[in-house]
Structure formats: C-alpha cells, structure tokens
Image (tube, helix red, strand yellow):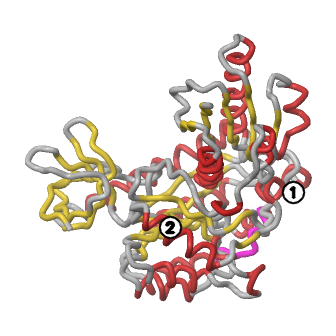
Amino acid sequence: MKIDIITLGCSKNLVDSERLMRQLEAVGYEVTHDAELLTGDIAVVNTCGFIADAQEESINMILELAQRKTDGDLKKLYVMGCLSERFMDELGKEIPEVDRYYGKFDWTGLLEDLGHEYDESIANERHVTTPSHYAYLKISEGCSRKCAYCAIPIITGAHRSRPMEEILDEVRLLVAQGVREFQVIAQELTFYGLDLYKERRIAQLIGEMADIPGVEWIRLHYAYPTDFPMELLTVMREKDNVCKYLDIALQHISDNMLGAMHRHITKEETYALIEEIRRQVPGIHLRTTLMVGFPGETDEDFDELMQFVRWARFERMGAFAYSEEQGTPSARLYEDNVPDEVKQERLSRLMRLQQRISAEVQDEKVGTEMTVIIDRQEGEWYIGRTEYDSPEVDPEVLISTDGADLTPGTFCRVTIDKADDFDLFGSVKETM
C-alpha cells in the first residue's frame, strides 16, 4: 500500500502529481514524493517531453525503475505525463516492463487499474509537496499559440482555462492549509479566459485572488508578449500582494527570428512592451527566456539579441540552444543549419552578459531593506526569497542563523549587507 511518485519537468507536472497523490491517499495508500528515496512496491513516473534533455532524463528514470522491477524490487511500474502522451506507442515497444502508460490527461485511469474510482468530490484538493507556505496554482492547460519550435501544443492541445470560481475555491482551500504565497502558472497565462468567457480575464482573476484574506504574495509565470493584456499591469501596481515580478518568455528580438519562430510580434513592439511594463509597474523584475541557434539565425540576428539584453537589463534571464523537436513546424519547415558549436558559443556569450547584468542588479540592492520570506535552514544560513524571486529558479537571500530564530513561512524585513553575482546576504531587522 505504498506508492512512490516521481515528478520530472515543470511545476505544471508537479501539480498533476499532487492531485494524483491526494486521490491515492484518499483510498488508503501511503504516497511519497522523493526520487532519491524509493521504497514503495509501486512507482509512478510523471514524465517531461518538452526538449531532448528532458526526454532523456525521463527515459533514464523509466529504465532505472524497469530494472528494479526486473530485479524483483518493484511490483508495478506506471508512466504518465508529457513524454508518455507524445511517444506512448514507441515507449511501450521499447520498455515493455512498464505495466501501463498514461497520457498527459488520462492519469485518472491509474486509479481504476489499482481497483479504485476517481473521487470527484476532492478533485480540487492536492497533497502539496512544496514547503507548506507556498504552492503552485495552475490556471489552465494547453496552448493555442503554436510557436514554430514548440512541441507543447502537440502534447497538451489547445488552451483550456479552468473556471474562475474553481480556481478561487482552490486558493481558499490552500490558504486554510497554511499556504501564503502562490506561484500562478500556465503555459500561457495571458490567454486565460478567452475560451470560457470570450475575453481575457487574467487581470480579474488575479485581482480577485489578491482580495482573498491570507493571500500574502502572488507571482505570475509564463506570460506571452503578443496582445499582452495591459490591464494586468494595473492590478500588479495597485495590489500590494501581487509581486512586482513577471515571467514573460520573449525568445528573440530580431524580426527575422521572430517571424521564423511564428511569434506574431515585432522587434519594435517588443521594445515598446518592455518600456510600458516598466513605466506602469515601477521596480518590476522581469524574468525572460531566450533562444539561440534557431534555424537561419545569423551573426547579425545574434548581435541584435545581445544589444537587446544590454538595453533591457532583465533582472532574471534564462537561455537555451535550439534543438529540433519531432512534429513541430520548425522541424518541417527549416533545416537545423546552425552548427552546435556556434549555438553553444552564442549561448555562452549571452549568459556571460546576463551574469554581469545580474551582478549589477544585485549590487544595487546592497544597503536597502527588503521583505523576505524564509523557505528553509541550511547549516548556518536561513534561506529566503524576496518578492522578486520565484522558488528554485531565482536568486535567494542568505541570513545568518546567529542571533536569529526564524521558521519557514516567516516574513521578515531584512537589511541587505552584500551581494554576489546572483544571491543576496542580509541581516534581520524585524519579523512580520
């Protein structure tokens, strides 16, 4: 009666795993979520199928567990998630030791295979696996954007918003369980509401979330720049508990690349959008993701990208090299003609530039006072985050345990004493 759940990939997958865990616990299973400590008779792998590296990680985990089953250390092995949705037939042939493969959205069938029914009465409940003071909140599934390089629409289908009241009920439930901070996630959150309400409702949703007692911080992830709903900026500016933070993936800046990627936005429009966001929400921290090495990217295209990053001075930035994904428009339309060594050289140059920018941004905070939420203790340090930092992907604030007595979930005012390229170091002025 013990099941190990292993989640790979993004936080959207994690929410699915948490919902499954709650369903399994409701029928009497002991469920753990620790890939490093597997002790159950049954294992469920929630896979990622986004890019080649993530696919390889998922396959290696399945193979490792398949070997455990062959050795007699595991009775049942089930696989769900994006990789399974995308390559179910191929996986079934290559790794037949798996008892059953489920797609991205049909994992409820796992309960039936274990002899139980899915309980609709707890469909909005989850076993939160993050620290108890914060949770991820998924507001939609799928994506209707169809960028040339992206396999997500192939895996998840078109955008599907969750009803607003259902989301707000989940927030109230999580607040009652002690959650104070919400990471709002979607493949494309600015699209929220178009399918259900025939208009964008993301600003209304976030505004109503912010009014729920007990919601201390709301942070927004995975916005899309095209047709950005400007009314969302008003909510961010006026609601104190909506963090001045926006994760908005831009991918590139040259018109040549934006057109080839099917991004439906221009260089001029992108510059104007960044200027308007910073004008309307002073002090906002922007996180973006950029891509190098897309088919046809020239030295001139890359130089434009470097110039853009110098101008925009993103507080948070990630980047990756293009890899061709089976079934995507770019795989059909373009030859992957940028050599790997050129991709890697461009990626290194871009990230070196961002490291310098990040160091300058962090240095500007030395001597200021900031609100920090404590996540954990590691040795002689309390580890926390500001409103400008999302868990796992952004910088952290390190506070000496000497003379301080803090617990996870505590908000405190911290004086920033020093900074390195990414993290901050501070001392507690007062708890809140």
Between the C-alphas of marks 2 and 1, the distance is 41 Å
Assess whether residue 153 is covered by the magenta stretch: no
Crowd band around label 2 with a 10 angstrom C-alpha radius: few (<14), some (14–19), many (20+): some
Residue drawn 75% across and 36% down?
79
Sequence-wise, the earlier of marks 2 and 1 is 2
Q: Is residue 429 above or below residue 212?
A: above
Residue range corresponding to the magenta coloring: 261-267
Residue drawn 53% across and 77% down?
274
The N terminus appears in which quarter of the rendering? Answer: top right
**Can residue 175 be seen?**
yes
Crowd band around label 1 with a 10 angstrom C-alpha radius: few (<14), some (14–19), many (20+): some
Assess whether residue 265 is covered by the magenta stretch: yes
Total marks shown come to 2
| Residue 104 image offset from top left, x and y in percent | 77, 50
> What residue would you read off at disc 1?
329
> What residue would you read off at disc 2?
173
The mark closer to the camera, 2 or 1, is 2
Which amino acid is tagged 1? Pro
The C terminus appears in which quarter of the rendering? Answer: bottom left
Which amino acid is tagged 2? Leu
| Residue 118 image offset from top left, x and y in percent | 74, 53
Residue drawn 74% across and 69% down?
263
Q: Is residue 109 left or right of residue 350?
A: right
Helix, strand or loop for disc 2: helix
